[in-house]
Image (cartoon, grey):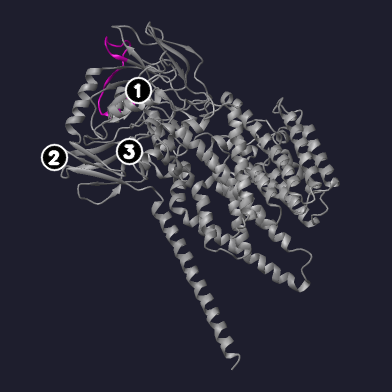
Amino acid sequence: MTFRRRALPPRLRATVLATLLTVLAVCTGDAAARIYPYGPRHRSVSDLGNQYVPFHAHLQDLLHGRADGGLFVNWQSGFGTSFLPDLGTYLSSPFALVVGFFPKDRVDLALYVVTLLKMAAASAAMASLLLTLRPGRWWAAGLLGASYALCGWSVLEASYNPMWLDGLIAFPLLCLVGEWARESRRPLLGPVVVALAWTANFYTAYMATIGAALVLLVRLFLESGSGEAAGAVGAGARIRIRALLRAARTVLLGIALAAPLLYPVFLGTEQAYPGWTREFTPASWTDLFARTLPATYSFSTPALFLGTGTLLLVFALAFHRAVPVRERAAWTGLVVLVALSLQWKPTHLFWHLFATPNGSPYRQTFVLSGLLVIAAWTALSYGLPDRRALLGGCGVLAVIGAVAASSRIVTVFTYPLLVLGLAALAGGLLVLARAAGRRGMVALGVLLLAGSQAGQAAATTAYADRVRIHRLDDYAPWGRHLDQEAAAVAKADGWPRYRTDPGREQTTGNDPLLVGGQGASYYSSMTPDVYTRTMAALGDGWTSRGRNIQSLDNPVTDAIFSVGARVHSSPDDPSPDGTRPPTVTRAEVPPLVTVRPPGPVPHFGRSPFRNQEALLGASVYTYAAACPAGSEVYYSAPNFTGTVRLGPTEVALNGGQKGRRAAVQPMGTAPGGVAVTPGGAAVTTSGERDTPHGETVAPHTERDTPHGEAGSSPHGETGCLSKARLARAVAHLKATGATSVTVTDDSIRAQLPPNSRGTAVLAMPSIPGWQCRNGNGPDHPAGSYLGLVSVPLNGRATTVSCTFRPPGLRAGSAAGALAVLVLAGSAVVRRAVRARRSGGGSTLTLAGPA
């Protein structure tokens, strides 16, 4: 008995080749750069280390039941904030679940694996799309699929912004959905794919949807060729209009299916602090051309590198006589128009949801890369370009290389890699031209082409790995210091009796997500406006123009927010044995729910010290020309850059520059009777004057601190904290506050002393979504007491409880349910129609012979 080996289907072979080539090129480039996990250099730069690693660490904790909070509330960051918008922004990709299979101290490795899987999936999706658009050689589809996944945008920018990679996957998948709509196929699967794309990352899915719509329009245009008979023109137009309507229906239903997540994310962006605004400035054309070449890097230009072979095919398309003229003109014209749209402000804004992004202004580059790959496939699917087409493509490539030579982005590696890639490409094409169907020759030619593509991509990856760490801010990866910090936080944790703050000496802007605890630090695109303004009024500092809130090491704010334990570590100043062990300081603090007496709600002013007193409900600072002996000295100059000194203590302030705000700084204990003004001997400043970039943010401002008041300076002011007064204020809040507090994933409930009157203040920001009740009364939207959640008390009820529901969840869920009903109804109708047609056909067949 003999067995015959069955060959893999061409589509599967193409996707496997694309996947393997993509993973091999990325891993080879990272290994050559000796970057994690292949060497000592870490890859935690920019938002990768500051946002994605901590958020994925929090997802790990959620999946394993270790997190404080659930899908609706994140109790660990920002003193309690809405989590669903963050989930939809950073963690809603199906690939994010991979982190659940890794231990907490391997979150960096987990995220690297997620990145590889996303790039591999993008290459496979593109290879499958190409074979759907036109028949052709499976190995060519595999090579071009890998070229797409290894584009400059992917390996240079999205590799450290892994949520963008979901858009890289979405573009070819949405193009497939367009094909299904054009052919009236898979009406149920299409909306599901759209929903998955928009759920994974709505921002890049929006761009991918635009790109897929452009591809569908070209496909429909090419169908309306001159071959249509005169009488069939009207019928053809109706067919194409119906195809467009099917595509629009598919997209709308898919977005509606994703609405339970999308709408809360949308409202989260509306309620977020505005952050940075910038004007779009188009890149120079020399720089734009330079970005098509290997081993170039720039943050503010589109990374259009695709590999020499892909670009040569794109440029050869216009000269390839085997391709119909109409098709050549359509794909070439689309590529040119989209390239121009990157440089024109109105279309730039349209690509980016009508707001220039805070960062790279060319985030839609992956769509253009995908269109270039489709154009290259169109050229190759009609056969290898002839000599005329290759010479024409080489001529265009030579012009681009010559123009790019004057760009400062070009490096010493660019042109050698270009020449080597061309040599391997020429060898591969020559071998394929002479292969005459011989498998060995074909394999050799494909190997040369794959080597050209993978070699240039690996070299570009390695180059980016080496230069990125020097051009972007970086954050320490998980190591011994984070192990010790996490252990210290876990040992000190007493939630919900009190909060444990991981500390002012942060490793990232999201340390509570990374190492545990319930701190003030929080960095997200969704940082609530009310939280930023409240913390700024209390003297806190920030970076990223108000979206990266820092921990505030101040005993008054610790009392306000019930921070009973605070970790102190030195991640940037390790001891000889690896790291200086963290220490923990403890303090008596009120419970999470306290009571303020009846009366009008106070208002914030300009002085952070007076604002702290207003929220605490007691006077604890001394405002005099000299700090009393033994008092703790604090200095506030939010927009000052320089140093502040009190005796031997010197503190650096970095406020007002590039969206930075300096926090109130502890200066130590005051010696008796020494003046605290800059003219005295205690506090002196040196450095730049207040910068114009700074911003003073104080909500509900009615009163400004008078200029020239004792304890103030041209840069800021000094506060002298009385520890005895603070102790009395804390004791009073403990005596009148909650006797017990219960916290769940999305609610908080407090038992109060009998006859409590006035206002219950909950130590969490009053973000929209909190519904509270007094005793057994009805739910109502939470009030705001100087930016914190509040509930009025009538003296009769002895409990207050609040439950959080993300704004937009109910409306989004209704839209999703309606979409499910529409899809289910459509499926029932289609089944009924098919059954009727099948039954009618049988009756006619049986009646015929009679």
The residue under label 3 is 68
Pick the residue in front: 378 or 113. 113
Give above or below for 772 relative to 527: below
Residue 96, x across and y down, in percent = 46, 43
How far apart are the alpha carbons under marks 2 and 3? 30 Å
Residue 641 visible? The answer is: yes
Give above or below for 846 relative to 196: below
Q: How crowded is mark 2: few (under 14 residues within 10 Å), some or many (20 or more)?
A: few
How far apart are the alpha carbons under marks 1 and 2? 34 Å
The amino acid on which the numbered mark 2 sits, given as a three-letter code, is Pro
Q: In percent of the image, x 61 and y 28: which residue is there?
A: 32
Where are the magenta residues, as a range?
610-632
The residue under label 1 is 553
Judged from this view, the residue extending furthest toward the right is 388
Name the image quarter holding the N terminus.
bottom right
Q: In percent of the image, x 22 and y 26: which residue is there?
A: 730
The amino acid on which the numbered mark 3 sits, given as a three-letter code, is Asp
How far apart are the alpha carbons under marks 1 and 3? 22 Å
Helix, strand or loop at mark 3: loop
Does residue 628 appear left or right of residue 530 in this picture? left
Name the image quarter holding the C terminus.
bottom right
Does residue 301 appear left or right of residue 199 in this picture? right
Does residue 624 belong to the magenta stretch?
Answer: yes
State which tag comes first along the sequence, 1 or 3. Answer: 3
The residue under label 2 is 754
State which tag comes first along the sequence, 1 or 2. Answer: 1
Helix, strand or loop at mark 1: loop
